[in-house]
Image: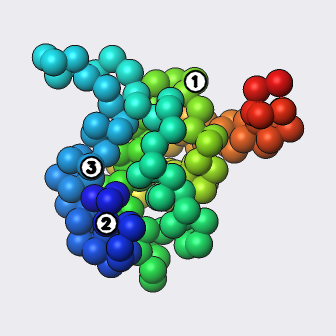
Amino acid sequence: MLHYIYYDTQKLHYAIASPTGANASLDPICFIETPEGKVYDTGMKKPNKRIDVLDELLSKQDFLVEGGFSLADVAVASYLLYVPQFFQGVSLSRWPNVVRYMKRCAERKAYGDAFGPQVQSYLVAACDGMIGSEKDDKKKLFGMF
């Protein structure tokens, strides 16, 4: 799914218009599993070229497909939002546009209706925290000192 971003955003829309497309593309990035299929960590603690490309795309537009919120956003954002939900304390601040996108999607009324107001408020606050930590990281020399 995310590899289509390199070529054409409309192809991206078609590739992720179903939960299966988002699952197949994001699962190996968002979740690290044992051979038995048990999730034990997230791959988003490390740099990822596909998420870098997604961040670049989201620096130019609010949603994945020009024209506004779509089924592609439902599939991708819900998957991305599982990361801070299941791995509390993880920072995705290296991708500030992705974090802002996640927040925009989590703030939608329909997201709260689907996942509940407690999950919604937790994720909005988590995204706010990551946006704040991204600003703090820029103040540090090489992002660490």
Q: Residues within 10 Å of mark 3 (few under 14, many from 20)?
A: some
Percent position of residue 49, x then y = 45, 49
Q: Residues within 10 Å of mark 2 (few under 14, many from 20)?
A: some
In space, the residues marked 3 and 1 are separated at their CA atoms by 23 Å
Q: Of discs 3 and 1, which sits in the foreground? A: 3
Secondary structure state at the residue bearing disc 1: loop
Residue with the mark numbered 2: 4
The type of residue carrying mark 3 is Ser
In space, the residues marked 2 and 3 are separated at their CA atoms by 10 Å
Q: Of discs 2 and 1, which sits in the foreground? A: 2
Q: How is the image coloured?
A: rainbow
Q: Is residue 130 above or below residue 16?
A: above
Secondary structure state at the residue bearing disc 2: helix
Q: Is residue 36 above or below residue 24?
A: above
Secondary structure state at the residue bearing disc 3: helix
Q: Quadrant of residue 59?
A: bottom right
Q: Is residue 138 above or below residue 61?
A: above
Q: Quadrant of residue 40?
A: top left
Between disc 2 and disc 3, whose residue precedes? 2
